C-alpha cells in the first residue's frame, strides 16, 4: 500500500534527519541562518509552484491537473506549499477510498466516523489476529500523506494484541550488544 522505498520518501526522510540536525546546532546564529535559508528556499519554491499551477491550469486539460494531483510526489509537494487544488476533506476522502480498496481485498474494512479540519476519526475492522498494528501504520501513512496538516487522527478498533510475555527477537539482540 505504501511506497516506503520511493525516492520522494527517501528525500522526506533525509529532510527530517537534517531538520533534527539543524535543531540540535549549538550555535544559535548558525541555527537561525540554517532556518532562514530553508525558509527562503521554501518561499521561492512555493512562488514558482504557484505560478506553475496557474500556467498548467490555464493551458492544460483538466486531465493534466488530475494526473499531477494523482502523482504522490507532486501531490505531496502541492500540499506542502498549500497549492493542492483539493481541500482537506476531498484529499482525506480520496485516501479513505484507497484504504477501503486495500482493506476490502484483505477481508478487513475501514469506516469514516468523523472528518473535520482538526480531526479524522476512523474505525478499522480486521479479522486476522495481530493485523491491527500493521493496519494502523498503513492508515496513518496514507492519511497523513494526503493531509499532513491534519491535527489529529484517531483509529478505533485497533489493539496491540501481542502476548505481553512475547519478546521480539530484535529486542533480545539489542540487549546483547
Image (cartoon, grey):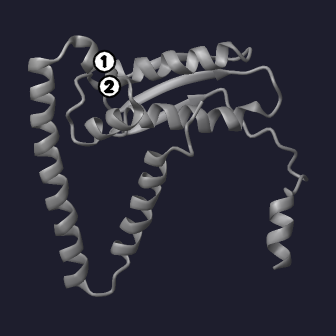
- Quadrant in the picture for the C terminus: bottom right
Considering depth in this image, is 156 or 45 the residue closer to the camera? Answer: 45
Q: Which mark is residue 66?
A: 1
Q: Which residue is mark 2?
A: 69
Residue 159 spot, x, y in % from top left: 71, 35
Query: From what the image shows, is residue 84 above or below residue 14?
Result: above
Considering depth in this image, is 166 or 43 the residue closer to the camera? Answer: 43
- Quadrant in the picture for the N terminus: top right
Q: Residue shown at 69%/37% (left/top)?
A: 134
CB within 8 Å, label 2 to label 1 = yes
Considering depth in this image, is 71 or 93 the residue closer to the camera? Answer: 71
Q: Residue shown at 31%/29% (left/top)?
A: 117
Residue 117 visible to an observer of this rendering: yes
Query: From what the image shows, is residue 31 above or below residue 137?
Result: below
Residue 124 spot, x, y in % from top left: 63, 23
Residue 60 spot, x, y in % from top left: 17, 17
Q: Residues within 10 Å of mark 2 (few under 14, many from 20)?
A: many
Q: Residue shown at 37%/33% (left/top)?
A: 147
Considering depth in this image, is 54 or 91 the residue closer to the camera? Answer: 54
**Tag 2's secondary structure?**
helix
Q: Distance between the Cα atoms at labels 2 and 1?
A: 5 Å
Q: Residues within 10 Å of mark 1 (few under 14, many from 20)?
A: few
Q: Picture quarter containing residue 175?
A: bottom right
- Residue furthest to the right in view is 165
Residue 110 visible to an observer of this rendering: no
Query: From what the image shows, is residue 38 above or below residue 128?
Result: below
**Tag 1's secondary structure?**
helix
Q: Residue shown at 15%/25% (left/top)?
A: 56
Amino acid at each position: 500500500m505504501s511506497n516506503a522505498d520511493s525516492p520522494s520518501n527517501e528525500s522526506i526522510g533525509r529532510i527530517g534527519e537534517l531538520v533534527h540536525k539543524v535543531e540540535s546546532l549549538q550555535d544559535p546564529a548558525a541555527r537561525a541562518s540554517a532556518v532562514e535559508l530553508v525558509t527562503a528556499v521554501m518561499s521561492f519554491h512555493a512562488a514558482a509552484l504557484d505560478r506553475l499551477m496557474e500556467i498548467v491550469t490555464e493551458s492544460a486539460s483538466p486531465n493534466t491537473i488530475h494526473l499531477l494531483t494523482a502523482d504522490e510526489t507532486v501531490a505531496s509537494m502541492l500540499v506542502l506549499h498549500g497549492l493542492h487544488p483539493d481541500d482537506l476533506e476531498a484529499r482525506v476522502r480520496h485516501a479513505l477510498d484507497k484504504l477501503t480498496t486495500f482493506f476490502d481485498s484483505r477481508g478487513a474494512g475501514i469506516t469514516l466516523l468523523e472528518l473535520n479540519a482538526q480531526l479524522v476519526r476512523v474505525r478499522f475492522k480486521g479479522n486476522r489476529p495481530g493485523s491491527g498494528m500493521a493496519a494502523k501504520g498503513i492508515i496513518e501513512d496514507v492519511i497523513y500523506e494526503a493531509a499532513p496538516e491534519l491535527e489529529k487522527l484517531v483509529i478505533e478498533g485497533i489493539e496491540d494484541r501481542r502476548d505481553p510475555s512475547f519478546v521480539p527477537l530484535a529486542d533480545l539482540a539489542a540487549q546483547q550488544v
